Image: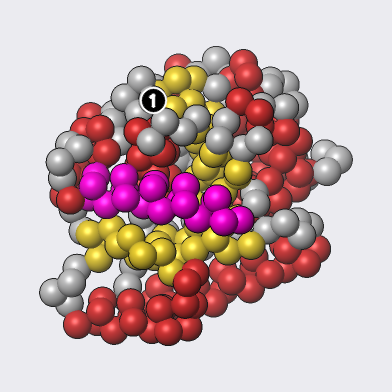
Amino acid sequence: MAKIFCVANQKGGVGKTTTTVNLAAGLAKLNQRVLLVDLDPQGNATMGAGINKAGLASSTYEVLLGSADIATARQRSEAGRFDVLPANRELAGAEVEMVELENRERRLRDALALVAKDYDFVLIDCPPALSMLTLNGLCAAHGVIIPMQCEYYALEGLSDLVNTIKKVHANLNPDLKIIGLLRVMFDPRMTLSQQVSAQLEQHFGDKVFKTIIPRNVRLAEAPSYGMPGVTFDPASKGAQAYIAFGAEMVKRIKKM
């Protein structure tokens, strides 16, 4: 059965989508069966996996509203060698339309239960806000991966996210826990980055992943080619870091 993880952070621009797409590709390189769920109406993870979000017959939107299932809506990312439940702007409408539905927080969890046996990992790319979409992701997941930059404002937002995860754990999903914090866009030349990194290790201990993702232009270029950075330039430092992160995730899951 699949292990289901949200990649979440209430702060925008911290590399959630880059992490989700490249971790999916990194795990696929390690022969893991992966489904990437795009829960963001911007559809950036869908595009980053090489799928045209404009021409979708069905998507995350239809799955959440119950008019399609994941088995029919999913598509194959040939570039990344993993499956994708794609999203586009239609998904923004699901926020309003789900309000009157039964079990609205658990729509994604129930849909994933039907395909869980097909995968080793399910990675959910959440929007940068605590919305009904993010709540569906948190209710469906076994754990949360938190990508964050090593800067002051990131620490401010982290406490809010941890409190949100605690509330969801207490009220909606007792299985939910923080799997780990991933340091992304890391620049070792900056003293502040090193200081914040040390603070994270001090406060969160082994919840901080050993892998550090460096700031890397090849990772930023890859989405414009419709490819994960891991396959766009496998020799780049960013790609190598995400492959290492995939290996660390597989090890960590075996201990769970």
Write down the quadrant of residue 209 in the picture: bottom left
Q: Nearer the viewer, residue 144 or 99?
A: 144
Q: Position of residue 232 (x, y in %)?
A: 21, 33
Left or right side of 1 for 160: left
Q: Nearer the viewer, residue 114 or 192?
A: 114
Q: Nearer the viewer, residue 228 or 66?
A: 228
Q: Residue at x 17, y 77 (%)?
A: 190
Mark 1: amino acid = Arg
Count of numbered circles in the view: 1
| Position of 252 relative to 233 (above/below) | below
> In which quadrant is the N terminus drawn?
top right
Q: Residue at x 66, y 28 (%)?
A: 117
Q: Position of residue 103 (x, y in %)?
A: 83, 43
Q: Position of residue 113 (x, y in %)?
A: 72, 33
Q: Main secondary structure of the magenta part?
A: helix
Location of mark 1 (residue) = 81
Q: Residue at x 24, y 45 (%)?
A: 239
